Every structure is written in structure tokens, then in C-alpha cells.
Amino acid sequence: MATIKHLSSKNSNYAAAESYLTFQHNEYTGLPILDEKGRPKLRDSYLLDTLECGESSFAMACLIANRKYGKNDRREDVKTHHYIISFDPKDAVENGLTMERAQALGLQFCKDNFPGHSAIVCTHPDGHNSAGNIHVHIVIGSLRVRTVERQPFMDKPCDWEAGKKHRCTSAMLRHLRVAVMEMCEQADLNQINLLEAQGDHVSEREYWAQRRGQRRLDHANAKLAAEGQQPTQTVYQTELDKLRKQIYAVLNKTTTFEEFSALLMQEHGIAVKESRGRLSYCPPGRTKFITAKKLSKKLEKEQVLTALSQNIQLAAIIQPSSEKKPDKIRKLVDIQANVAAGKGIGYERWAKKFNLKRWSQTLCLLQEKKLLSEDALHQRIAELQTQHDDALAVVKDLDARMVSLKELRGHLVVYRQYKPLAQKLQTVRNPAKFKEQHRAEFAVYEAACAYFKANGLRTLPDLKKLDAEYQTLSSEKNGFYTRYKKAQIELRELRTAQQNVEAFFRKEERSHAVPQQEVK
């Protein structure tokens, strides 16, 4: 799936853009990485071309245009626009996408959509997340250096006249998303519908906040591990991510909007309001509401109401447990090792009480399950491991089939929705104009047709049958998932109990051991 992202810059140093694309930079600070001689290090691999720059460099071409038209002389002026097209990592293996091919696609994309702008087009083999996704950077000077022929997506004279600045409006971004979808369709690359939000909305700012927070947390956990302590948190969460998870947790167990909003406030202090048909959320400590659009597609009004109606259907089979859950069995603490590492007397007293309680729980568990012999315990763990692995394999298989059905259903809905439009195209007087007016709709319609052709679907399935099959798979998956979780919980308990037994007898052996030189 190819995606497109936009960034704007007010940096008057136009050479910095080319420097970032050709030299290695620290992904957290943005500063260049230097070699042993203090010189910037080139990237291991990249392809770079310029457009509309003539004999000059990109920086010089932008400065000449600014001087010629008297623009971009204020600090608050946007100097460059940066677009990033990221391709699906699977395209390199499945569809033969190479850096050279991606660079050619990026150059053509730039010529078609940013004509008249000085531009740098640069392809990198991988991204910050090391997922192996080839991506293309397109950096354009904000000022158009020549008048270009008007294109259908241009609606004002400033969009094609020389000396005018590039406008990255919502309509322009929509056009670019459609252009990316069409480009991938023509190049036989993996693609999704970019016109609809996909799951959680993570902004550039939140993405880097999460990366920096995870880096700090990893350093802190490394120090704890060196001191022999167990980290309490391994995954860093941003405030927005915490908010999403809190809302999801409440949404999964409520059936009406009134119950949903009341429980959000009761459990997490989150206020929810509806304005003009849209939902907004306000966590404690804030006065300004956050729109659902900035959090996740799943938290918008229509999706929330759909989830609540599904919960009503499942309410009959959901039986909340009223029994008090027992304490988890935890591992015994190695008191001698921790005392030797520098722990004090207070810690030793606490650890002895802790171990006594955990050893008592371990014995009660083994007696309850009648696993008082070592062989019986090993055999039961092996049985649970088999049950756990088998159930997990079935759950993954069913989940993959459900994802496939969901994808098929999405294409089927789009196909049926826009098929009358495709039929109308055959009867209108000016097909080219009609197709350009409905360009986005035809893009997703043709993507659906290509999906059916790629999967050999000559006869399209019925929506009701697809929904019924999906519900059947969902019920079957829930049953196997319950088995998987049950086996996982018992397996974790018995493994901890096994480790506690082994640790206890090792301690007993150490306490009864007599040094060789003291034997008389």
C-alpha cells in the first residue's frame, strides 16, 4: 500500500533539504551524523534527480525565483513543500519494485502534479521504522518559476501562473491521494483506498513523540536490567494513544451511547460531546476537546454507534464474572543474589515475606490441580503447550480468512456503489470531462475491478452471504480464542510454579551444602 504524506518548511536554507536527503541524519534530533573526521556521512544508498532547475542547483534555482518575483522574504513564509510517497514493503518482493523503478515513478508523479516548480526527487531504500519500504521524497520550491498549462485539478489562476505559490489545500491532497492510487494501479503495486481513513490517526508529531519516548524507556529499562530489577513497562504510550485505548476499553463493554459517555467519565474522567454530528473527547487535565478525526476513524460517531449495536447482539453470550480473581502466581525472588548486589536488610525482610506468600500460592495451585510429582507437572505443561499452539494456529487462520472477507466486502460495496456511474459513462456526450469530474470515484471503482480480476472472481458473491460467513468465522474464532486464552493463562501459571519449585529446591541444596574442607 502506497501512502503520501505532506510537510511544509519555513527554513530559508534551501540547501538543507538536499543535505537531508543525501547525508545521514539522527532520526531523533535531525542533526547530521559525522564520521571520525567530523564530516557528514553520506547515506548508504539513494537516487536523486532535480527538475526545473536548469544549470543551477535546487537551492540556487529557488533563490533566483524568489529574487525575480520578490517573494519568500519573510520568516513566516513557507519556502518548500515536502511530499513523501511510501510504497508497501511487499512490493519489492511480490511486484519487483526497485529503487530505479520507484525513482522513475516519483519523477513522473512530480512532473504531472507539480509542473513549473523547482524540485528534488530522491528515493531511499528504507524508512525510519526499518520495515524495508522503498519511499520517494519530492521537495518542491513553494514558488512556481514558469506558467504551465492548466490541469483539471487546478481551479484558480494562482495554480498555474508563474510567480505564484503552491497551495496544499484539502482538495489538492485529495487529488494527490487519487493520483497515488492511480499510479499504483497502473504499475501493478499494492494499494489501499486513501480516500478513507484507515484505523488510528497518528500525526507526524505523535509518531516522533512515541519514538523518542520509547528510546528513553529502553535506556531506563536497560539500567534496571543491569541492576537485576524487572521493568514494569516495556512499551511507551503517548497521551493520545492512552486516550484511544481507554475509549476502546469502554466502547467494547457498553451497548448504548448514554452508557458509553457515562462510563467514560466514571472510569477515566473523559468527557465526550457531539457537535454537528461529530464526536469530540476531552481527557482530564485538558479544557479543549480533541475531535475523533484526530484520534481514530473507529471513534467517529457512525463507527461508535455501529460498535454499540454489535455489542447489543453479543450481550446475550457475554457473561461477566462476579467471582473475585485470585492473585497471580509470581516468581520467587533470588534473595541471596539481590543482597549480594547491594540490597539492604529492609529488602531482605520484604523478600522473605514475599517468597513465603508466593510459595504458599504455588503449593495450593499444585495441590488443586493434583500435580505434586515432577513428571505430572511436565506432562501437563506439554499438553497445555500443544493446546495453546493448536488453538493459536486456528485463530490466526480464521483471522486471515476474516481479513480477506472484509477486504472482498469493501471492494464489493465500492463496485456496486459506483457501477451505475461507470454505466453512465457510456452514454454521456463528453466521457473525458465526465470521468475527470468523478475521478476519485472511478479510481476506487477500477481498483475494485482490478481486485476481482486478480483473484479470478468472475461471479461476484452476495453481500448477505459474505456477512453470514463472516459472522460464522467470527463465532468460530471467538471459541478457539477462548481456548487459547484459557490454555495460555494456565500454562503461564504452571511454568511459574515450575520455576518456583526449582528455585526452592536449589535454595534448599545451597543451605544444606557443606564445604569440603569442613568435613572431618
Image (cartoon, rainbow, N blue to C red):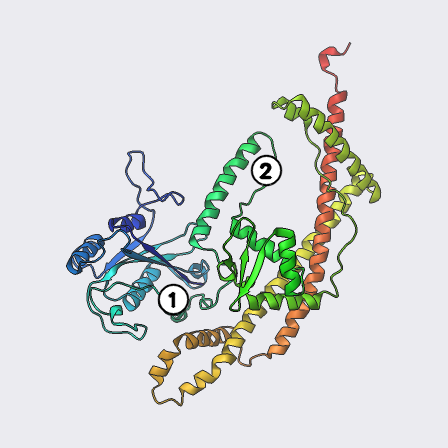
Tell me if residue 464 comes above or below residue 54 in the rendering. Answer: below
Horizontal side of residue 288 vs 270, given as left or right: left
Horizontal side of residue 449 vs 19, given as left or right: right
Horizontal side of residue 373 vs 205, given as left or right: right
Q: Residue furthest top?
A: 520
Horizontal side of residue 215 vs 318, given as left or right: left
Can residue 456 be seen here? The reply is no
Residue drawn at (65%, 53%) of the image? 266
From the image, tell me which residue sits under label 2: 231
- Amino acid under label 1? Ser
Image quadrant for the C terminus? Answer: top right
Q: Position of residue 133 (x, y in %)?
A: 42, 56
Q: Position of residue 2 (x, y in %)?
A: 42, 63
- Amino acid under label 2? Pro
Q: Position of residue 414 (x, y in %)?
A: 50, 76
**Looking at the image, is mark 1 or mark 2 nearer the viewer?**
1
| Disc number placed over residue 270 in the picture, else none | none
Q: Secondary structure at mark 1?
A: helix
Tell me if residue 243 comes above or below residue 498 in the rendering. Answer: below
Residue 163 or residue 327, whichever sits in front = 163
| Disc number placed over residue 170 in the picture, else none | 1
Q: Position of residue 66 (x, y in %)?
A: 19, 57
Q: Number of marks in the image?
A: 2
